[in-house]
Image (cartoon, rainbow, N blue to C red):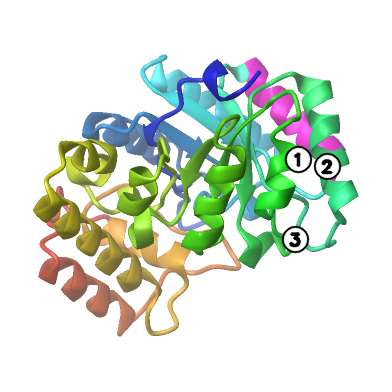
Amino acid sequence: MDKNSVDWRGSMPAIVTPFDAKGNIDEAKFRTHIENQIGLGATGVVVSGCTGEFWALSMEERKRLFKVAVEVSRGRINVIAGTGTIRTQDVIELTTSAKDSGCAGAMIMPPYFVKPSTADIIAHYETISDAVKFPIMLYNIPSYNQTPLTPELVDRLANIECVVAIKESSMDFNIFYKTILVAGDRLRVFCGPAGLFGMAAIEVGSPGYVEAFPNFWPEAEAHQFCEIVKSGDQATVQRVQKRALQLSELMSTNGRNYYTSVKTAMNILGLPGGFPRRPLTLLGEPHVSQIKQGLAELGVRKVAAAAE
């Protein structure tokens, strides 16, 4: 199994998990959101990732979301299940559920908090690969998992049987590019921070991106980075990249939590964002007004009656 064993490409947004005011999963909004993403041109969705607040979900809730996403997609897009957690056995259980539910693969970050050694990380992925025999997308986000998947380590992990891709979210283009150089022959190296350098990542060989901004950017443009780069229209390339950067920055400025900002923006635009789950809370003023103004200035328009 290698990168040619899967057809993952293009825009595969990391989607939110909508909750209601009491903290229950709002399954109707979740289904609607996936349909919206398909309609706008997503080639896949990542469920129960960081943007999906995986840390706030129980094992059974994550398994349920995998099944629902596959039901909604009906084979039209790839559903990638976020199955990362600390204990290897729990990852195996979640990844097995994803496989049984009909997902296309699993996105797995290295164990967080415990700061595993290089040997620990390699053993972790080898054990999962051997146990489940299911396509794996590595997930490098050092700001959260603490132990980075360096290009040198990814070069070794790429030799594990079921590892076929990586979401590279180090926020450092040098690391991203070196990862492509050392492992791009075996892995699909997806760009995480496409808002920062998605166009450049595609230019140097990335097959696509796993980003959060398509959640609150309800235009086909948010899913067309690959096509825009291939068109060679540099004016459009620069315009879209600038807009993506501005939207991403809007979500995280003035001390705002990115994930709650995404849902706040979705609700402002009439999209099915819902509530975050504790410990996160919806933003209040002045943040709501600032995000509303920022979206308006960037030309992102409401698509329906705003969610309450």
Residue for point 25% across, 79% down = 290
Q: Secondary structure at mark 2?
A: helix
Question: Is residue 183 in view from this perspective?
Answer: yes
Question: Horizontal and vertical percent for residue 99?
Answer: 65, 20
Residue 79 in magenta? no
Question: Is there a contact, CB below 8 Å, between mark 2 and mark 1?
Answer: yes
Q: Nearer the viewer, residue 55 or 92?
A: 92
Residue designated by label 1: 156
- Compared to residue 158, the image places residue 257 above or below, namely below
Q: Secondary structure at mark 3?
A: loop
State which tag comes first along the sequence, 2 or 1: 2
Which quadrant of the view contains residue 127? Answer: top right
Residue 147: mark: 3
Question: Is there a contact, CB below 8 Å, between mark 1 and mark 3?
Answer: no
> Which span of residues is magenta-colored?
87-100
Residue 89 in magenta? yes
State which tag comes first along the sequence, 1 or 3: 3
Going by the picture, which residue comes out furthest to the front? 181
The residue type indicated by label 2 comes to: Ile
Distance of label 3 from label 2 (alpha carbons): 12 Å
- Compared to residue 195, the image places residue 304 above or below, namely above
Question: Horizontal and vertical percent for residue 69?
Answer: 47, 28
**Crowd band around label 1 with a 10 angstrom C-alpha radius: few (<14), some (14–19), many (20+):** few
Which quadrant of the view contains residue 67? Answer: top right
Q: Which label lies toward us, 1 or 3?
A: 1
Question: Is residue 308 in view from this perspective?
Answer: no
The residue type indicated by label 3 comes to: Thr
Q: Nearer the viewer, residue 243 or 160?
A: 160
**Crowd band around label 3 with a 10 angstrom C-alpha radius: few (<14), some (14–19), many (20+):** many
Judged left or right of residue 63, residue 73 is: left
